[in-house]
Amino acid sequence: MLVHSKTGRWAAWGLFGLLFLPLFALPLLVVVTASFSTHWSGAFPSGPTTGNYASAVRGESLQALTTSLVTALVASLLALTVGTWAALAAARLKRRGKRSLDALFMLPVAVPSVVVGLAVLVAFSKPPVLLNGTSSIVVLAHTILVTAFAHQSVSAAIVRLDPAYEQAAASLGARPAYVLWRVKLPLLLPSLTAAAGLCFALSMGELSATMMLYPPDWMPLPVRIFTATDRGSLFGGSAVAVVLMTATLLVLLAVSRIRTRATYR
Amino acid sequence: MSGIRFEGVSVEYGGNTVLDRLDLTVEPGEVMALLGPSGSGKTTALRAVAGFVRPAAGRVLIGGRDVTALPPHKRGIGMVVQQYALFPHMRVEDNVAFGLKAQKAPKAEMAGRVAEALEMTGMAAYAKRHPRELSGGQQQRVAIARALAIRPGVLLLDEPLSALDAQLRSGMLAELARLHRELPDVSILYVTHDQVEALTLADRIAVMDRARLQDCGTPQELYRAPRTEFTASFVGNANLLPVTVAEAGALFAGRALELDRGRAVPGAHATLCVRPHLLGLGAGPNALSGTITEVQWRGSTHRLYVDVEGHRIKADLPELRETPALGDHVTLHFEPRDAVLLAAGVSDG
């Protein structure tokens, strides 16, 4: 805590509460409340029920949850592999090459995701690579969107990695591949799991590109929430949203447990 | 038996020459210290042997084999660096076994060689610990054990004691000397900026400054008869006095000094090198009188800075009963055989 005086500290906490509560906590609280209601006409909701959840965890909603989990898992693993590979390769490049590679990987972040979705749709709607209407096109779009984050966080970790480890390993007679598997990747593991968590969370919540691409048999959960609320089923949609939120948080919690066990320093 | 040989090795970084045509041979079983201030090129020379920098010119040979174009992992070296670089995710025994596993040593041998290396460095009791659970000195021992486990022909030590405190350092210095006695075939290249380490441990010292080799010889040679001003001041912190060579001795600030002129030509400008601890207080041969400008008490000695005709002379004297005061007029003297005449430009210690 940088603020030393007691009044200052209280003021800081007050400001934090003033900004945090309405901006972050309240909207989430509203969704949770709505998910347990049947009506909300006045200031407070009415008709408490758990019925929304009964339908949110079975049938099409359950299928959408599985779809989201599978998509996010595959996309983040692919993104992590590609992003790490590129980051390791970029570290060996000269400054200019590294900068252009970094810029290339940041492109999907700079471009609006709707545009990325449209681009993927147009590119893969005709042979030779016809992916339109398959689940692969959704996974592909998610991979493209989250690879940037994987690449960036792994790049940052590689820069911080002391080259002395790699050199010590090489001086002991270890081939570069052996150094990568036994020294570099284990030392990067905390950053890799952090990047995986970030990719997973982003993919779980992706809507705009997915909207343009999803086939009828591969509808991820955010799309389901959107269509439910679009039809006016606000409370059912809220329940599905809470399920999405909980599932994502549970996975992130699991990933963070791996991270703490893999932190050496 | 394998030594190290530098043949005209130059290294450049972005247009700067950081190592300039180094020619140096480390004999098999010899401890060679590369001594110099930071930026002198000594670490670059070591890294050229390890394979982490590629020479712009010249060749590096290990055991008579040209390794200039070989990647580090094919060079058969052991290396220990200042910050240890132990793998934090491995236990001590796995750190020591790393090189053996990487080189696919027979499983049957592995345990024995790991135990042997840990025994040699006195770390056998810590085999199951992680590096973060060890002190700095213990980590350094593990780093040495790790380098020795692969039984390298040459051992590269890059400022291995710099991160340790003074007391540990002198202990580790004795340990390194003992290890070298136990491994008489291993050539050691020891990079340091600390003259005490170099004088204590090395069979020969190569003095480096500004990317170049300045001087090379046994510690005694460099200390008693330095060949350059840089060596004289860097090793042993000598007084360097500008003198003019005379028929019988030399002239310093108008005073005649009696000394062994050697081969110096009378009339030539030269530098006289006198070690601070070889100066005595009071009248005697080669007396120099001046005013005290600074007094430092160093426990067993007093260091006096005396201004003689505008030249600052350092003298280390056995602790004086009465501490001299600033501004006191004193006379220092030295024996003719304790001074070395260097052919060089004028410089003031």
Image (spheres, grey):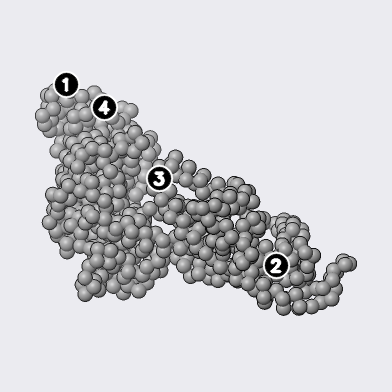
Q: Which residue is mark 2?
A: A241
Tell me what residue is drawn at x 31 percent, y 42 percent: B37
Q: Three-letter amino acid code at disc 2? A: Ala
Going from N to C along the chain, the mark reached first, 2 or 3, is: 3
Mark 1 in CB contact with mark 3 (< 8 angstroms): no
Q: Nearer the viewer, residue A62 or B311?
A: A62
Which chain is mark 2 on?
A
Residue B147, picture quadrant: bottom left
Whether residue A69 appears in this view of the structure is yes
Q: Which residue is mark 4?
A: B346
Q: CA distance from mark 1 to mark 4?
A: 14 Å
Q: Which residue is mark 3?
A: A93
Q: Nearer the viewer, mark 2 or mark 4?
A: 2
Going from N to C along the chain, the mark reached first, 1 or 4, is: 1
Badge 3 density bin: few <14, some 14–19, many ≥20, Cα 10 Å? few
Q: CA distance from mark 2 to mark 4?
A: 83 Å
Q: Position of residue B57 (x, y in %)?
A: 23, 37
Q: Three-letter amino acid code at disc 3? A: Leu
Q: Secondary structure at mark 2?
A: helix
Badge 2 density bin: few <14, some 14–19, many ≥20, Cα 10 Å? many
Tell me what residue is drawn at x 28 percent, y 72 percent: B124
